[in-house]
Amino acid sequence: MVLSAEDKANVKAAWDKIGGHGAEYGAEALERMFVSFPTTKTYFPHFDLSHGSAQIQGHGKKVAEALATAASHLDDLPSALSALSDLHAHKLRVDPVNFKLLSHCLLVTLA
Amino acid sequence: MVVWTDQERACIQDIFSKLNYEVAGPKALQRALIVYPWTQRYFASFGNLYNAEAIMSNPKVAAHGVVVLHGLDRAMKNMDDIKNTYAELSVLHSEKLHVDPDNFRLLADCLTIVIAANMGTSFTADVQAAWQKFLAVVVSALRRQYH
């Protein structure tokens, strides 16, 4: 899947609108995902998943930072995200279907 | 058999009461056709779908968006038997229209985003969860008659 020049411009514009709220939106997206799609909680048995938990806030920040990295490396996403991909595939062993669930919840948060 | 809590029923009724079918339906379908372009394959008879502007101003797309929402309205009014309410629709989408059922999920996701934008912060995580459950039941009912 290749991003066109227009796609990249749209992504940059959308990311700029997020401004400094990345961590907050990341945390909200995670919480929405855990509530709407409870199977995703199975990857976080070690987390306190109650509303407003510090661990969700912290993890939301990590997710936002990763997205920021991605947004600033639109021309070589595969290599920019390769370490994260390895982590999720080999160490965390997350079924990739869950990435779609989180990205849907991120879109809902932004909407 | 799907079990709905009173809270879930209330959430779904509330969402529909705030929904303008004439606005949300077209918006959701337009998004699906633009964001997931392969869905256009089912609408060859709708004329000009060449770019986002064409899709957003296409009257057949808009009209069909409203049809879809009225279909969802039937599910909302028959929440305890969505499976049978949708039996005919499922056969239609499978036997006559030959729609890949994965596309139901895509349209459902687009509608969720339109609703979230419309309801803003009142579309809380709990409200979203009830809505996602409703959509999952709807999509599952639509898939049932495929063979």
Image (spheres, helix red, strand yellow):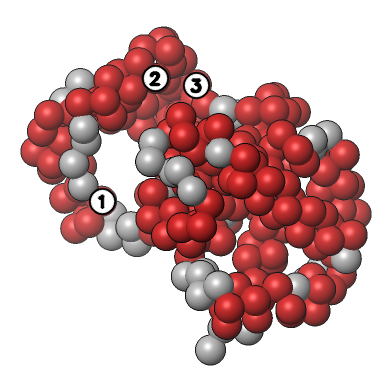
Circle 1: element type: helix
State yes or no: discs 2 and 3 in contact (Cβ < 8 Å): no
Q: Is residue B45 above or below residue B48?
A: below
Residue B137 in the figure: left or right of residue A52: right
The disc, 3 or 1, on the residue closer to the chain's N-terminal end is 3
Q: Are marks 2 and 3 on the same chain?
A: yes
Question: Can residue A38 be seen by looking at this rendering?
Answer: yes
Check if mark 1 and mark 2 are on a common chain.
Answer: yes
The residue identified by callout 3 is A24
Q: CA distance from mark 3 to mark 1?
A: 22 Å
- Depth check, front residue: B79 or A53: B79
Chain under callout 2: A
Q: Amino acid at mark 1?
A: His
Q: Is residue B113 above or below residue A110?
A: below
Separation of marks 2 and 3 at Cα, in angstroms:
16 Å
User: Does B119 sit above or below residue B79?
Assistant: above
Question: What's the amino acid at mark 3?
Answer: Glu
Where on the picture, by quarter, is residue B68?
Answer: bottom right
Q: Looking at the picture, how far across and down is residue B84, in whole percent?
A: 80, 79
Query: In the rendered structure, the residue with mark 1 lies on which chain?
Result: A
For mark 2, give the secondary structure: helix
**Residue linked to disc 1:** A88
Instruction: Identify the residue at image location x=71%, y=34%.
Output: B23
Which residue matches tag 2?
A: A14
Nearer the observer, disc 1 or disc 2?
2
